[in-house]
Image: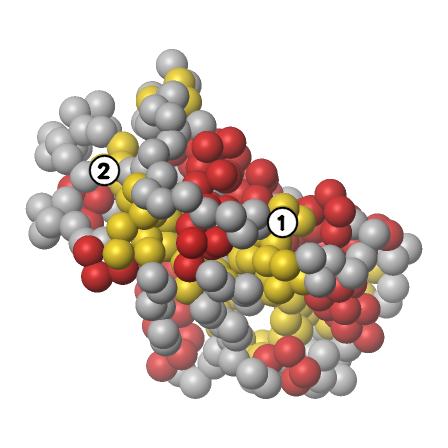
Amino acid sequence: MGMESKYVWMNGELVEFEKATLHFLTPALHYGVGVFEGIRCYATARGPAVFRLKEHAERLVASAKVLGFRELPYTAEELADAIKLTVSANGFSECYVRPLIYLAEGGWNLTVDTGKASVGIAVWEWKNYLGEEALANGIRANIASFTRHHPNVMMTKAKITGNYANSVLAKTESVRLGFEEAIMLDPQGYVAECTGENLFIVRGEKIYTPPTATLLEGITRDSILTLAGDLGYSVTEQPLARDQLYIADEVFVCGTAAECIGLREIDFRTIGSGKTGPVTRAIQQAYHSAIRGQHARSAEWLDYVNTVVEMPVQVAASRSRFA
Ligand SMILES: Cc1ncc(COP(=O)(O)O)c(C=O)c1O
């Protein structure tokens, strides 16, 4: 996967890609004490546009608050501006955006209070997370043998780097077994989410999705709730059991990286017709036009990237305070 770019934004400055490095003794690397976002910027008729930038920047700051940071070097608005600047400095018309707030010093006593938050933003050209064929044909998934986090063990509303060891366990198992994605059950045994996507099922004309108590509050999930409503579907948030997946007419998953993808098979059981179903297709199409500036919802969801760049940039050192 080509992750190269010209510049990475680090603590207020754009630095050359090769120089965006950290020391081996970075505490975030040892204890998983970081929070991140996954964001996409799309090519539109009006140039590159970041999808739901405000919501992603706010979730990033919220994740830091959940992890216990009392102070950040930048506000959500400043981080959103820094993201646009990083996209435009790299000249990509379409890219994935990865901001990370991490403990770069202190924290060896297992608190966040003895360290200071650092921030980096990288962008790269990342097209199909689940592969070329996934969009048309859907993918095959299994139920992971690993349980999703209990909400009082790891904080499931936050994109904490350490949380993702759980996703890595499940996804590695799934891919080694020959599947493309893992569906994870919550500690009570209900369907939670995939390793990096939220999940929906379709039965008849009705759509269902698990409530968010134990899951990440996905921004794509939120967009799809709106788009499905616009299309006239009723969507109910309710606990779902594993066998409700097996007997669904359609199952689809959604996330920033994967976008909106049908599941054609789960645990060796064909789902519906075994192809991406009509409801999933309608929602997929609405989502694809929304992200590319061709939908009535695009105006509220797209943040166009200004192509004028000043280098190097120093973002004012105002602070987000939680305490
Ligand atoms: C565990 C998990 N669930 C769901 C999602 C989907 O969230 P979003 O739509 O905000 O990308 C992600 C990806 O960020 C994720 O990592």
Query: How are the colours assigned in the image?
Result: secondary structure
Q: State the separation of the CA atoms marked 1 and 2.
A: 31 Å
Residue displayed at 68% across by 83% down:
136
Q: Which mark is residue 304?
A: 1
Residue sitting at 83 percent across and 52 percent down?
Answer: 296
Tally the marks: 2
Category of crowding for the residue at label 1, using alpha-carbon neighbours closer than 10 angstroms: few (below 14), some (14–19), many (at least 20):
many
Q: Quadrant of the C terminus?
A: top left
Q: Is residue 119 visible?
A: no
Q: Is residue 271 above or below residue 7?
A: below
Q: Position of residue 24 (x, y in %)?
A: 9, 52
Residue in front for this viewpoint, 140 or 305: 305
Q: Is residue 86 left or right of residue 107?
A: right
Q: Residue 105 appears at what percent x and percent y? A: 15, 35
- With respect to residue 172, does 321 lie above or below? above
Q: Residue at x 26, y 56 (%)?
A: 16
Q: Which mark is residue 103?
A: 2
Amino acid type, label 1: Tyr
* Mark 1 or mark 2, earlier in chain: 2
Q: Residue furthest right?
A: 232
